[in-house]
Image (cartoon, rainbow, N blue to C red):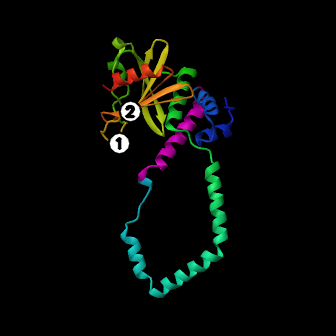
Amino acid sequence: MACTFDQDLLTAYLDGEIGLERALEVEAHLSSCPNCSAEAQDWKEVRATIQSAEFYYRPPAALEAKIRKLLPDRSRKQRAAWIQHWTWAGGGAVFASLVLLLAFFLTRPVAPSPDQEMIASHIRSLMADHLMDVVSTDQHTVKPWFNGKLEFAPPVKDFAAEGFPLAGGRLDYVENRRVAVLVYRRALHVINLYVWPAADNTSSAFADRTMDGYNVISWKNGGFEFSAVSDLNAAELRRFAELVSP
């Protein structure tokens, strides 16, 4: 059966041109529509590939010097005179172009921040009944489940004795990268812990913030970056983070 979902809305979502509320609407649809979900996944993978450093070439610094040596002195003088002439003649046009460019970038919709992406993912996991791909309270079951699905092995621990039992895990995307999500519970609250490799092995202090009624705490430790998202109060979420990264 053909999907009747608004493709313009899907395209705007993929381009980061809609707000959080509409983004959640799209993500709820993606969780139930295999065709649109596959299309969105293909688009994210293509964008990640295009943004890869392998597609960019930086010419050597000596190249400019070599080219300049090939230009005779007269050509340089003529070029300078030409630039001076057109600087005056085309100044108004250049200024107008700069104004238009500035207006474009100031009015262009801002792509969702990493925090917004994770909060949207957290809400989507609760709304669309896709909280976990692997359901288990055993860390020795959850950790091996990620083998072959990620390029890294996320650290998985159970904190049931401390009141934060492990519930399972799933895969998700943040900033066009595939990340591990470990799911914990605290009474009736769900904690989504996002984990991905850090650029280095340095550690960082906990960074707390609140957005759209959800608490987010992020830090780096042991070669990984962590972000915990929940509607749990900030003090208890900080306690959870301290357990994850003692």
Q: Position of residue 94 (x, y in %)?
A: 63, 67
| The one of 181 and 3 positioned closer to us in this rendering | 181
Image spot of residue 19 (x, y percent): 62, 36
Residue 156 appears in view: no
Q: Which residue is mark 2?
A: 219
Magenta part of the protein: which range?
A: 32-53
Q: Is residue 107 above or below residue 237?
A: below
Frontmost of labels 1 and 2 is 2
Residue bearing the label numbered 1: 199
Residue at 40% over, 65% down: 59
Front-lying residue, 94 or 44: 94
Give the number of marks.
2
Secondary structure under the numbered disc 2 in the rendered image: strand
Q: Say which amino acid is labelled 1.
A: Ala
Instruction: Note whether 35 is above or below 156 in the view shown.
Output: below
Secondary structure, magenta segment, majority class: helix
Please state which of residues 23 and 32 is positioned toward the viewer in this rendering: 23
Magenta-colored stretch includes residue 176: no
Report the residue at 61% width, 38% height from top: 13
- What amino acid type should be assigned to the residue bearing mark 2? Trp
Answer above or below: position of 109 versus 128: below
Confirm whether residue 62 shows in the render: yes
